[in-house]
Amino acid sequence: MSIKHPIIAITGSSGAGTTSVTHAFQHIFRREKLNAEIIGGDSFHRYDRAAMTAKMAEEEARGNKHFSHFGPEANLLGELESLFREYGESGRGMRRHYVHDEAEAVHFGTPPGTFTDWEPLPEHTDLLFYEGLHGALQNGAVDIAQHVDLRVGVVPIINLEWIQKIHRDKALRGYSTEAVMETILRRMPDYIHYICPQFSRTHVNFQRVPTVDTSNPLVANDIPTLDESFLVIRFDNPRGIDFPYLLSMLHDSFMSRPNIIVCPGGKMGLAMQIIFTPMIMQLMDRKRRAR
């Protein structure tokens, strides 16, 4: 953790909704005129798209049917921890981009499914913001969580997470439902061993719970909307959290435990704004004082 060079990490699995949370943070950064360097976790995958496909086939031929991006072997976790450590110490580090689609290919000048070259971070950033799978990971000698000043988990209940992933991968990648479920099942051991434990190390967790029937995610015709959901917000340390203020701002909300507030899903954007803005500004105040 660092006072002069703070780091924020959003952690959640594929299909959890971390991109929407990132957009909420970007609104705060723009409004508060903060220069945040945003790091995508997929830029620290070990293999590009073609190489990952080949590696999965190789592992399956060896009897390993669960090789996935969720696990440590498919990622450059040591390099990610090094980035966080170096940024916390000096505000510097090396990063690259993963090119997702044709639009990004035009921007970065390299084909979809590949990485750009490594390059130094821009100078004079206010903070580092990470969105990906491993922002709160502790695994053997690798301890990424220790370097992060604000760790946020995004965790829909599992059936909702599957519905979101099925719909996204079918719409954006042309996958069949069966192919998406095969991916989910292949990743499950790594999900349990490497993704779930991170949500016990986050400072704040956002878990969306639908109020419609999601008992069979394979036949869901659409994704439950925010207005068809409740949002369960868990604070690791409730000390200093102004719960009466949050309850007054988030109408129809209530507290289910001393460190948990439950609010309508449609209030998700507002909840993030009023919860994280003071947390971010506190980090910035500490940064200014340290200078």
Image (cartoon, rainbow, N blue to C red):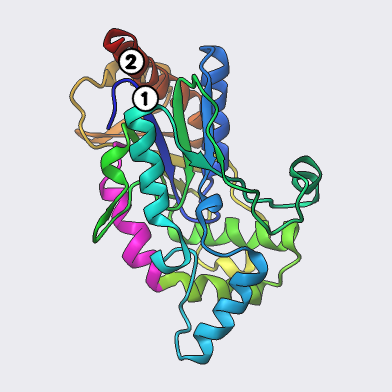
Q: Residue at x 55, y 50 (%)?
A: 43
Where disc 2 sits, the SS reads helix
Q: Quadrant of the C terminus?
A: top left
Q: Where does residue 77 sit, x and y in percent of width and height?
A: 40, 55
Quarter residue 5 falls in: top left
Q: Which residues are magenta?
A: 189-205
> What's under tag 2, amino acid-wise?
Lys
Q: Residue at x 47, y 75 (%)?
A: 67
239 and 44: which is toward the camera? 44
In the rendered view, tell whether residue 251 sits above or below residue 138: above
Q: Is residue 152 visible in the rendered structure shown here?
A: no
Q: Residue at x 33, y 20 (%)?
A: 4
Residue 67 lies in the magenta-colored region: no
Tag shown at residue 287 = 2
Q: Residue at x 77, y 40 (%)?
A: 107
Crowd band around label 1 with a 10 angstrom C-alpha radius: few (<14), some (14–19), many (20+)? many
Q: Quadrant of the N terminus?
A: top left
Q: Which residue is mark 1?
A: 5
> What's under tag 1, amino acid-wise?
His
Quarter residue 153 falls in: top left
50 horizontally vs 147: left or right: right
Question: Which SS type dominates the magenta stretch?
Answer: helix
In the rendered view, tell whether residue 151 sits above or below residue 52: above
